Amino acid sequence: MPSKKFSAVFAAVILILTFSLGCGGGSGGNGGGTGDKKIPDLKYKLHPVSLGDENTIYQVMQENNAKALILDFWAVWCEPCKEELPYLELIHREYKDKGVVVLAATIDPFDDEQMINETLDGTNDSKIKKSWKKLGEFKLIDGKVITMDIPVDGNREIANALGVTSIPRTFLIDKDHNIVYQHTGFDEGKVEELKKKLDELLSK
């Protein structure tokens, strides 16, 4: 019978192999031509999952009268993902009163609440600190650095439903639940392209 230590190491190796090709920076493709594929009404649990808060994509859009939704996938072990988080947070702060919902979904296990908390705190993570310093923004809102909603896709049901095999992966969804734009990887150019597509969508 394998030891617990061996099982943990084996699980970690599988995790790394699963996403070894997908955790990257600016090398990922944009993949903007989606053909307006409709996103399913996926159910998710919000961090911290211990509170038991659940929602669905359609429900959160309806509750916020959303004109657009940005859905991003990340993980605590993905360095480019963490570098991207402050950029997404600033989009959330800039557009939340314009009918835009931003969801930054972590694919980390449901029981990794402490590690997720430490990452979202941002004060001890070099990648997040680097981005905040570059952006010149580090303003707490209600005592938090990250205020956008963080779904926890611990079993990767949402990621799998959308065919996500590489992270960070970002989707832009219109009010009719169509995926109108997506990209993989992180760099500032992709953030600007996302905002450009978002502005175009809001102007319709």
Image: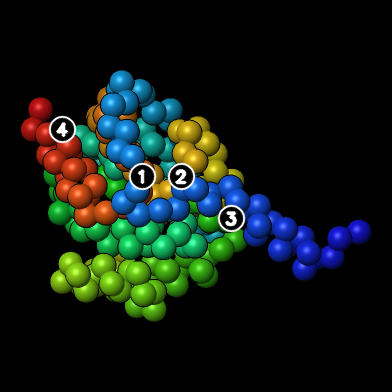
Query: Disc 1 vs disc 4: which is toward the camera?
Result: 1
Front residue (pair 176, 160): 160
Q: Which mark is residue 56?
A: none
Question: In the displayed image of the protein, which residue is found farthest to the top?
Answer: 35
Question: Residue 52's spot in the image, x, y percent?
Answer: 52, 53
**3 or 4: tag closer to the N-terminus:** 3
At mark 3, the secondary structure is: helix
Residue drawn 46% across and 48% down? 22
Residue with the mark numbered 2: 166
* Among the 4 quarters of the image, the one containing residue 179: top left
At mark 1, the secondary structure is: loop
Q: Is residue 147 above or below residue 134?
A: above
Query: What's the amino acid at mark 2?
Result: Ser
Query: What's the amino acid at mark 1?
Result: Gly
Residue with the mark numbered 1: 28
Query: What's the amino acid at mark 3?
Result: Ile
Question: Residue 47's spot in the image, x, y percent?
Answer: 46, 57
Q: Which mark is residue 201?
A: 4
Disc 3 to disc 2: CB gap under 8 Å: no
For the N terminus, the image quarter is bottom right
Disc 1 to disc 2: CB gap under 8 Å: yes
Q: Is residue 63 above or below residue 151?
A: above
How many C-alpha atoms fall within 10 Å of the one at disc 1: few (<14), some, or many (≥20)? many
Residue 125 lies left or right of residue 204; in this view the side is: right
Front residue (pair 120, 168): 168
Q: CA distance from mark 4 to mark 2?
A: 25 Å
**1 or 4: tag closer to the N-terminus:** 1
Question: In the displayed image of the protein, which residue is found farthest to the right?
Answer: 1
Query: What's the amino acid at mark 4?
Result: Leu
For the C terminus, the image quarter is top left
